Image (tube, rainbow, N blue to C red):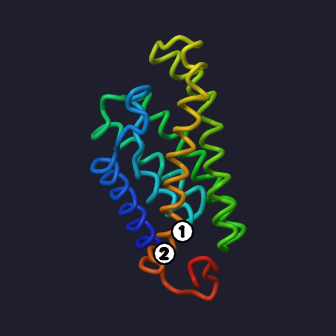
Amino acid sequence: MSAIRKLCTMALLVALSIVLFTIFRFPPFPVVAGHLEYDMADVPILIGSFMFGPIAGLVLTLVASVIQGLTVSAQSGPVGILMHFIGTGAFVVTAGTIYKYKKTYLGAIIGLVCGTLARAAIMIPANLTITVRFYHVPYEVVKGMLLPVIIPFNLLVAGINSVIVFALYKPIKLLFMEKTKNDDQFAAH
């Protein structure tokens, strides 16, 4: 794939991420934590990580996080950008790295499961430090929300997005990528 085509595809994936965030989001736990919203913004980013590798996935995460944080999610400010970058970054780097070395259905599944677990795991210390420090929520309150809200929320978001990526990756990759001798087995079949 030419560098220009790759850059254009990555830009399109970031734009799609922002559009999905804008039109499709809802709080899965509205009574307990209405500020936590499920969105599909990670789907194009994760597809980009599978297509171009984990570093590209992290770059997509950074660009999408900043654009989203300065526009459609401006109320969350720099802290929201940081939290999105941490959670999505752990997700796409983990999944993308595993998939980079095992480009099969099984590799995709293992990558997506491990990426989901990585997101949930990294958001524990992120919430215990960043939410406490910048949103001034008492440590004990955040700690009390870990098991009933924060961990299930992150598992839910990443899990749903993983299922969507698993279902859409093959047709999207075939749409954007040129067929080569070294195509991954997951997208080729």
Residue matched to label 1: 51
Q: Residue 163 vs residue 121: left or right?
A: left
Alpha carbons under labels 2 and 1: distance apart: 7 Å
Q: Nearer the viewer, residue 187 or 66?
A: 187
Question: In percent of the image, x 49 and y 14: which residue is there?
Answer: 137
Q: Nearer the viewer, residue 80 or 43?
A: 43
Tags 2 and 1 touching, CB below 8 Å? yes
Q: Residue 144 vs residue 66: left or right?
A: right
Residue 147 vs 167, above or below: the answer is above
Question: In percent of the image, x 51 and y 58: which residue is there?
Answer: 46
Residue 12 vs 142, above or below: the answer is below
Q: Position of residue 48 (x, y in %)?
A: 50, 63
Image quadrant in which you'd find residue 129: top right
Q: Secondary structure at mark 2?
A: helix
Q: Earlier in the sequence, mark 2 or mark 1?
A: 1
Q: Secondary structure at mark 1?
A: helix
Residue matched to label 2: 173
